[in-house]
Image (cartoon, rainbow, N blue to C red):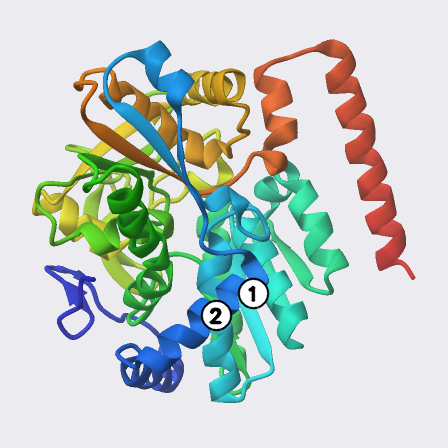
């Protein structure tokens, strides 16, 4: 696994936060440094993932789809089979163990697609913690089923109405809350971004994905894969998929960002490719951000709420600049096509975020030889995307049914909050 140089990865990373947050970050960093090389702590973490979340997740061959596409053999690392339906639970369980050691009783989190918020709510319920989760108002509309479950689990969900009302604004509000409540609150940051030590810490817990993947590839394929592909929003699932392979130069690592509608400003969320993201400092760290002509954070778009973010992990920014990670992009159209293809040929329902990795991986696999192997990290399942998918594949009676169910869920939620 990659290690920072005093919180930096090349020119990216760092800790640019209000002075009031420095003691909490220092406490977290010191505890992380103390525990990261302790085999007993790692075993405690892995044991918790096994008994509560269902790890290890399988490595699944896509035999029918590989034959249909031609080219390389395609495999999926099945993070969609985790408890809560995504890779996000890996990180929150690890941070939950740290919260227990710090003796804090409240956690806060930001979420875009809702999967990190749901995972945080589950962890808080499991460990008896109070939880507040910030989510952009637009993302609440797109991912209301997750919001409903977060509230049923006992967490407070705060809709953020400022700016674009998406993940960037939710992260800003979470940082403001933490600055005001740092004494008794831990910020469970959901991706490999933010001020040090979060990028390294989140990547550490998510590395369980690639550690398993490596062992499974050797057992099932007989060697390491030729390529590992993952979608990239903030970067937690990508760092999880890439971590154990960073020293294996023969394995190409491919990160697929949200190409959205086009590469025009405001119509995508591509940060790592040429002429898209630019170095900048915001939200507590330095990385590649989408910026406008005035140097302010730019507008973003993605069909997937979890990839609709203006920045990217400083680790991935560094790895893409050094050439270790190959950046790609998949458009909304390519994503829905990959989503449909996987469902119809293999019976697996992917998340829209993960479908970016599918689109990029399928495209690359078609250009490769049949004796080569591509592993795509399927970071989550598509249950949460049912309303957005219904819009992408319109069927009048089904759309009407989904709208009635959404209205009914909102009425039940409103009634519960009014009790």
Q: Residue at x 55, y 85 (%)?
A: 104
Task: Report how many numbered discs are placed on residues in the image.
Answer: 2
What is the secondary structure assignment of the residue under circle 2? helix
Residue in front for this viewpoint, 341 or 273: 341
Q: Quadrant of the C terminus?
A: bottom right
Q: Residues within 10 Å of mark 1 (few under 14, many from 20)?
A: few
Q: Quadrant of the N terminus?
A: bottom left
What label does residue 51 carry, if any? 1
The residue under label 2 is 47
Q: Is residue 301 above or below residue 119?
A: above
Q: Is residue 31 above or below residue 117?
A: below
Q: Residue at x 18, y 62 (%)?
A: 2
What is the secondary structure assignment of the residue under circle 1? helix
Residue 362 coordinates in the image, percent (x, y): 31, 21
Q: Is residue 202 above or below residue 390?
A: below
- Residues under numbered marks 1 and 2 in contact, where contact means CB atoms less than 8 Å apart: yes
Q: Residues within 10 Å of mark 2 (few under 14, many from 20)?
A: some
Residue 390 coordinates in the image, percent (x, y): 64, 20
Residue 270 coordinates in the image, percent (x, y): 29, 35
Task: Determine the CA span between mark 1 and mark 2.
Answer: 6 Å
């Amino acid at each position: 696994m990659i290690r920072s140089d005093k919180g930096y990865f090349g020119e990216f990373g760092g800790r640019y936060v209000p002075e009031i947050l420095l003691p909490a970050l220092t406490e977290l960093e010191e505890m992380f440094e103390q525990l990261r090389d302790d085999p007993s702590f790692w075993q405690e973490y892995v044991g918790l993932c096994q008994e509560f979340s269902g790890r290890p997740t399988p490595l699944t061959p896509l035999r029918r789809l590989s034959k249909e596409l031609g080219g390389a053999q395609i495999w999926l690392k099945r993070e969609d089979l985790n408890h809560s339906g995504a890779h996000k639970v890996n990180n929150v369980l690890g941070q939950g163990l740290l919260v227990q050691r710090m003796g804090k009783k409240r956690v806060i989190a930001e979420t875009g697609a809702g999967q990190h918020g749901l995972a945080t709510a589950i962890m808080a319920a499991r460990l008896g913690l109070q939880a507040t989760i910030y989510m952009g108002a637009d993302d609440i509309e797109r991912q209301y089923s997750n919001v409903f479950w977060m509230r049923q689990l006992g967490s407070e969900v705060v809709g953020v109405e400022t700016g674009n009302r998406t993940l960037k604004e939710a992260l800003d509000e979470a940082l403001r809350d933490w600055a005001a409540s740092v004494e008794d609150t831990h910020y469970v940051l959901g991706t490999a971004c933010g001020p040090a030590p979060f990028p390294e810490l989140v990547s550490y817990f998510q590395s369980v994905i690639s550690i398993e993947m490596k062992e499974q590839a050797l057992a099932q394929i007989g060697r390491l894969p030729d390529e590992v592909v993952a979608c990239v929003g903030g970067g937690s699932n990508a760092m999880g998929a890439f971590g154990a392979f960073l020293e294996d130069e023969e394995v190409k690592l491919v990160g697929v960002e949200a190409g959205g509608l086009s590469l025009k400003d405001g119509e995508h969320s591509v940060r790592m490719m040429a002429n898209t993201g630019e170095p900048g400092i915001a939200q507590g760290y330095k990385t590649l951000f989408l910026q406008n002509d005035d140097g302010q954070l730019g507008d973003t778009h993605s069909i997937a709420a979890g990839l609709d973010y203006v920045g990217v992990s400083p680790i991935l920014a560094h790895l893409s600049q050094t050439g270790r990670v190959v950046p790609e992009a998949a458009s909304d159209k390519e994503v829905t096509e990959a989503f449909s293809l996987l469902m119809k040929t293999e019976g697996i329902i992917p998340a829209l975020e993960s479908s970016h990795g599918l689109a990029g991986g399928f495209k690359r696999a078609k250009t490769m030889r049949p004796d080569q192997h591509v592993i795509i990290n399927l970071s989550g399942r598509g249950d949460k995307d049912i309303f957005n998918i219904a819009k992408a594949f319109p069927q009048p009676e089904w759309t009407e049914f989904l709208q009635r169910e959404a209205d009914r869920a909102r009425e039940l939620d409103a009634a519960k909050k009014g009790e």
